[in-house]
Image (cartoon, coloured by chain):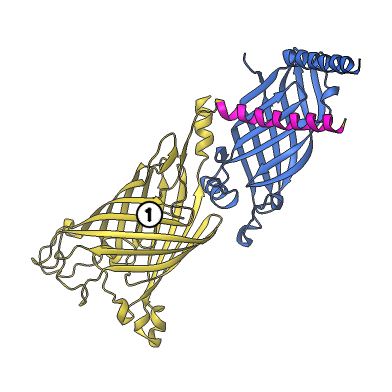
């Protein structure tokens, strides 16, 4: 009798498994898109492949203090800060646009960012996410040499990047970002208008809400020879952490650059890590969901 | 003689089973809806999944559900990302499944149209953790078929080892209310 009951129970259990199998069998294979390669749209100074989702407005405050090497009299750089205030908006899930103003050289900037490929597994397989980025910067401070004839176009800078990133596992993500910076006006004939820079960035997640990020911008030699504010231009190196709380991401880092705009950190970084020319930097982001894009799409489909 | 008796018993059993099999119907859906709702003084969070699969077997009342975690849609894209990335870890545990049975299936008469209260028990697997659950639900019978099922119950996140970091504990409830709404079709039709 017990055996019979046992038999029936097993029958019942396998019956349930069969039902689950039945559900799996008829299921079409779906594409599983990788999410959260990076926590926010910046790795530290530079852009990441991430874009804001449709209908999401992001407010970004970027702060770069002075140099640690400036000593106690400047409170290790804290007395001297530059700030960038910016807005970014997800027009679609793949198209992100942004504007900002940096107090450094009173620079206005704007950018457009488009996600070309999304890393995925399943039905559609794609090893990387690829995002194209174009930025523009406008220096609005007073002309350095007001005596000569100055053109508005001389205030303009452009950059074009192709960001390619892969999330290897839930911990590690890596990004390569070849970039071309175009400067309409350069300091001397020795300087090229076009500078090629290779950005390399990575993150290692320590917990759900904490990650360590590293970023390096390597300038292909030969393009820049003039000094910037009396100092040689360096490759930008930044190391910091992401801390995430709900709708905010705080990034706190050390960097030898005071740039929050692409052309600034890529081609005008002058700090020397070995001499302690290190800036403490913050990025604080807050997102606001303007409308529920998924719901809108769902209602449209009906 | 004893052998004969046993043989008859076996044959009768088989006969009963086979009639049952002939009459057995499966009710299924691939676009069932599961929603959950978490409420705290700081924030209400709601998510809907419109791609839930489920089968109910009229033979014995076995019932299963399969839920793709990435199918949950949130009002805020960032919440959806955090849900998948940090809380339910969808890459590692892509699906939640429930397998169980309607305990009082014998009391469900397919002859009468209308709603019947039932008790479902079984095992819910989510985030790699299985728990025994027993919940009340309602079946809707129409024209000799189960056309709908509904249930509302609470899940304690800790039971499934879903950890909420201290920084957002005020925003996310420890318990979430789950609403299950299925509309079944007859399998094979």
Residue B122 at x, y = what percent?
75, 37
**Is residue B151 one of those drawn in magenta?**
no
Chain letter of mark 1 equals A
Viewer-nearest residue: A119 or A63: A119
Determine the residue located farthest toward the left in the rendered image.
Answer: A189
Give the percent coordinates (x, y) of residue A247: 53, 54
Q: In the figure, the blue chain has which letter?
A: B
User: Which segment did they paint magenta?
Assistant: A2-25
Q: Would you say A262 lies left or right of A26 here?
A: left
Q: Is residue A28 left or right of residue B61?
A: left
Residue at left offset 83%, top offset 29%: A4
Whether residue B42 is situated above or below residue A240 in the rendered picture: above
Which residue is pictured at 36% across the width and 47% down the height? A97
Kindly identify the residue that appears in the image at 46 percent across and 52 percent down: A169
Residue B49 in which image quadrant: top right
Instruction: Please identify the quarter of the rendering in which residue B126 is found.
Output: top right
Q: Is residue B40 visible?
A: no
A76 or A49: nearer the viewer: A49
Instruction: Label 1, secondary structure: give it.
Output: loop
- Residue A223: image location, x then y, percent: 15, 64
């Amino acid at each position: 009798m017990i055996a019979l009951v046992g038999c029936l129970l097993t029958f019942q259990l396998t019956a349930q498994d069969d039902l689950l199998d039945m559900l799996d069998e008829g299921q079409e294979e779906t594409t599983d898109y990788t999410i959260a390669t990076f926590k926010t749209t910046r790795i530290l100074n530079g852009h990441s492949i991430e874009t804001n989702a449709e209908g999401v407005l992001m407010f970004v405050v970027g702060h770069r203090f002075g140099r640690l090497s400036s000593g106690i009299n400047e409170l290790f750089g804290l007395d001297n800060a530059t700030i960038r205030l910016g807005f970014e908006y997800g027009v679609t899930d793949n198209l992100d646009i942004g504007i900002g103003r940096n107090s450094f050289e009173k620079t206005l900037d704007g950018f457009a960012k488009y996600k070309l490929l999304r890393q995925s597994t399943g039905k559609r397989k794609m090893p990387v996410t690829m995002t194209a980025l174009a930025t523009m910067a406008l220096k609005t401070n007073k002309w350095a040499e007001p005596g000569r004839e100055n053109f508005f176009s001389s205030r303009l800078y452009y950059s074009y990047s192709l960001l390619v990133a892969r999330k290897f596992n839930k911990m590690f993500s890596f990004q390569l970002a070849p970039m071309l910076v175009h400067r309409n006006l350069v300091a001397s004939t020795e300087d090229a208008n076009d500078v090629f820079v290779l950005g390399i960035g990575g993150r290692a997640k320590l917990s759900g809400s904490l990650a360590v990020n590293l970023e390096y911008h390597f300038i292909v030699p030969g393009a820049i020879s003039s000094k910037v504010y009396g100092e040689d231009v360096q490759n930008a190196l930044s190391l910091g952490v992401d801390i995430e709380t709900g709708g905010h991401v705080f990034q706190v880092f050390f960097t030898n650059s005071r740039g929050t705009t692409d052309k600034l950190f890529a081609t005008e970084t002058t700090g020397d890590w070995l001499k302690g020319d290190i800036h403490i930097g913050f990025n604080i982001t807050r997102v606001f969901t303007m409308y529920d894009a998924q719901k809108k799409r769902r209602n449209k489909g009906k | 003689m004893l052998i004969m008796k046993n043989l008859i018993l076996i044959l009768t059993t088989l006969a009963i089973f086979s009639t049952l099999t002939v009459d057995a119907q499966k009710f299924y859906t691939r676009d069932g809806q599961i929603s959950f709702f978490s409420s705290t003084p700081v924030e209400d969070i709601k998510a809907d999944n419109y791609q839930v699969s489920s089968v109910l077997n009229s033979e014995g009342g076995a019932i299963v559900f399969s839920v793709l975690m990435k199918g949950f849609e949130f009002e805020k894209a960032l919440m959806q990302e955090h849900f998948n990335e940090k809380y339910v870890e969808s890459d590692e545990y892509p699906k939640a499944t429930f397998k169980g049975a309607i305990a009082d299936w014998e009391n469900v008469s397919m002859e009468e149209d209308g709603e019947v209260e039932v008790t479902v028990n079984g095992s819910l697997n989510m985030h790699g953790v299985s728990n025994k659950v027993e919940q009340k639900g309602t079946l809707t019978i129409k024209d000799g078929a189960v056309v709908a099922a509904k249930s509302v119950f609470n899940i304690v996140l800790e039971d499934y080892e879903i950890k909420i970091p201290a920084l957002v504990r005020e925003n996310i409830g420890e318990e979430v209310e789950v609403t299950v709404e299925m509309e079944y079709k007859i399998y094979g039709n």
